[in-house]
Image: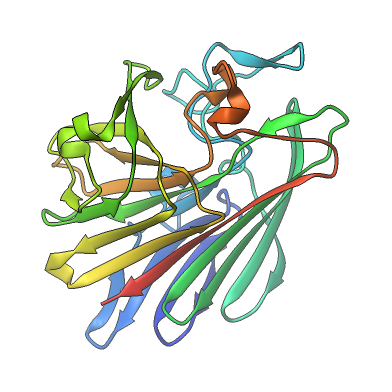
């Protein structure tokens, strides 16, 4: 079952049972709807063929079969076929229930405790307001033992030959074959990965984390005479850019709160993880504003 939100400018279709994902996000124009996220398959149960899904209680990969926190080791198993490492937490793979629905807003909720030390209640809100989609993600820890949390969203955008990204950064992480971070380099050395002044996607593959972001970005499709402004609150200090290459029909620009594999960093909290005690909450708002 999918739910549709709509105003005079935007239409949003959400699949609560498929990771709370977005199936379609469209601008309503006089000449017909224009896809802002990659159109998903409303008949599929795979979030990875949708337009956006939430990242909770962490983003991207965790190595080592788990991690240690406060002197305890917590094993984590791979959670996606073909992916050897646990990835993106479990919010994107679980069913969400509808807590509230109106014509331009829906609130989804779910609980999870099967990946210790994560024991949480989460709320996911989609809201249309004029030409803006706001996605709000909230997580509250329920466990007796504090745990490290992170948040983000994973949108998939249509890739066209002229599509550009404008987003600030002070550096980017190189990765190994497992897509784990190996070395950080300053953005002045990033070449075609320097999106500060606006740049097309590289011809080759990219799946890398950028640091020093101010939480504001612009995606532009000149062929469609369309721009999408991204704004985060509080400002996300990091984003991921992913696309297999120029032959791909999509790219991802993912606002996230923490570094890839931050659970194994020397100073995980400095890399963006937030330790929550029982009853404490972490939240983020991600806004996508259409400008034609």
Percent of width and height locating residue 231: 44, 61
Choose between 53 and 42: the one closer to the eye.
53
The quarter holding residue 216 reads bottom left
Percent of width and height locating residue 125: 62, 63
Lateral position of residue 287 relative to residue 250, left or right: right
Is 173 rendered above or below residue 131? Answer: above
Which residue ends up furthest to the right in the rendered image? 144
Lateral position of residue 213 relative to residue 222, left or right: right
Name the residue: 63% across, 69% down.
106
Lateral position of residue 153 relative to residue 16, left or right: left
Percent of width and height locating residue 14: 52, 63
Residue 67 seen in render = yes
Is 3 rendered above or below residue 168? Answer: below
Name the residue: 17% across, 50% down.
199
Lateral position of residue 160 relative to residue 57, left or right: left
Is 32 rendered above or below residue 97? Answer: below
């Amino acid at each position: 079952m999918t739910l549709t939100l709509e105003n005079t400018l935007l239409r949003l279709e959400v699949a609560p049972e498929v990771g709370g994902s977005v199936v379609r996000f469209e601008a309503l124009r006089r000449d017909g709807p224009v896809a802002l996220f990659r159109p998903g398959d409303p008949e599929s149960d795979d979030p990875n063929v949708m337009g956006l899904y939430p990242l909770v209680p962490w983003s991207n990969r965790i190595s080592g079969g788990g991690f240690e926190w406060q002197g305890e080791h917590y094993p984590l198993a791979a959670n996606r076929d073909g992916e050897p490492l646990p990835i993106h937490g479990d919010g994107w793979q679980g069913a969400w229930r509808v807590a509230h629905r109106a014509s331009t807003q829906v609130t989804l909720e779910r609980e999870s405790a099967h990946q210790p030390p994560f024991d949480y209640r989460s709320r996911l809100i989609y809201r249309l307001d004029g030409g803006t989609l706001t996605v709000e993600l909230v997580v509250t820890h329920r466990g007796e033992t504090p745990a490290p949390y992170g948040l983000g969203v994973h949108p998939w955008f249509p890739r066209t030959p002229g599509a550009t990204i404008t987003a600030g950064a002070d550096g980017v992480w190189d990765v190994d074959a497992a897509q784990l971070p190996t070395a950080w380099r300053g953005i002045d050395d990033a070449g075609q990965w320097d999106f500060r002044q606006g740049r097309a996607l590289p011809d080759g593959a990219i799946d890398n984390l950028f640091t020093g972001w101010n939480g504001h970005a612009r995606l532009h499709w000149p062929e469609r005479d369309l721009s999408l402004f991204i704004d985060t609150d509080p400002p996300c200090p990091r984003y991921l850019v992913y696309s297999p290459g120029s032959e791909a029909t999509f790219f991802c620009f993912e606002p996230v709160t923490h570094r890839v594999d931050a659970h194994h960093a020397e100073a995980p909290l400095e890399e963006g993880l937030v330790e929550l005690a029982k009853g404490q909450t972490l939240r983020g708002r991600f806004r996508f504003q259409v400008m034609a």
